[in-house]
Image (cartoon, rainbow, N blue to C red):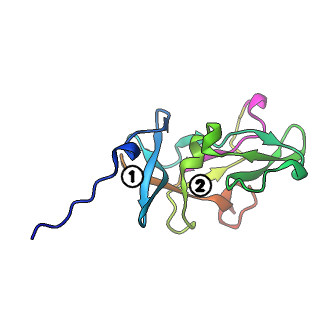
């Protein structure tokens, strides 16, 4: 008896967002398909994958608590905390990356990248933690965007 070959349904085979380094598509998680971020080419350790971006909210009371893509970041020029709503529905490629704990993640978030122009403040970048081969899913530790994170010391 031949084993059943499971294929991704056609509606999930498309790239839904991309840049020159990675693309957002769908990955099978159990019996469902969820968003995922994948390497578009071989990526070297330390390479910037994408910017975590979206609408910036400064009023904590105005935040839509139903979003799972909120990230606090300190504005360096304005010296205040803002919240980035990085939902993929709002055009954020970084929001396609699924979570992985630090030990197994191949990417992390960085909010203190050197020589960043002031117009990008506040900002958060996703950076390759290891070399990532073409086609591999990119998974990030969402707890590393803080410059004082224990793994960044």
The image shows residue 138 at horizontal and vertical percentages of: 48, 53
Q: Is residue 35 magenta?
A: no
Q: Secondary structure at mark 1?
A: loop
The range drawn in magenta is: 117-127
**Residue closer to the observer: 115 or 91:** 91
Q: Is residue 124 magenta?
A: yes
Q: Is residue 96 left or right of residue 42?
A: right
Q: Is residue 67 above or below residue 22?
A: below
Left or right position of 94 against 74: left
Q: Residue furthest left?
A: 1
Residue in the picture at 16% in, 67% down: 3
| Disc 1 versus disc 2: nearer the observer | 1
Instruction: Give the left or right position of residue 51, taking residue 24 as reference.
Output: right
Cα–Cα span, label 1 and label 2:
15 Å
Q: Secondary structure at mark 2?
A: strand
Q: Is residue 45 left or right of residue 14?
A: right
Task: From the image, tell me which residue sits under label 1.
Answer: 136
- Pointer 2 local density, CA inside 10 Å: few below 14, some 14–19, many at least 20: many
Question: How far across and how far down the image is residue 82, in percent?
Answer: 83, 46
Q: Nearer the viewer, residue 25 or 3?
A: 3
Q: Quadrant of the C terminus?
A: bottom right
Residue at 22%, 60% (x, y): give it: 5
State which quadrant residue 117 falls in.
Answer: top right
In the image, 1 versus 114, the foreground residue is: 1
Please provide percent x and percent y for residue 83: 79, 48
Question: Which residue is labeled 2 in the image?
Answer: 108
Q: Earlier in the sequence, mark 1 or mark 2?
A: 2
């Amino acid at each position: 008896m031949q084993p059943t070959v499971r294929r991704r349904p056609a509606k999930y085979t498309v790239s839904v967002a991309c840049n020159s380094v990675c693309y957002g598509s769908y990955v099978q998680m159990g019996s469902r398909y969820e968003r995922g971020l994948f390497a578009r080419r071989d990526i070297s350790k330390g390479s910037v994958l994408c910017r975590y971006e979206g609408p910036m909210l400064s009023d904590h009371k105005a935040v839509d608590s139903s979003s799972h893509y909120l990230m606090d970041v300190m504005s360096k020029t304005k010296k205040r905390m803002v919240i980035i709503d990085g939902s993929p529905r709002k055009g954020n490629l970084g929001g396609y990356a699924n979570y992985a704990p630090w030990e197994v993640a191949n990417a992390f978030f960085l909010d203190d990248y050197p020589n960043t122009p002031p117009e990008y403040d506040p900002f958060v970048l996703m950076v390759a933690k290891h070399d990532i081969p073409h086609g591999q899913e990119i998974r990030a530790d969402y707890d590393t965007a803080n410059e004082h994170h224990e793994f960044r010391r």
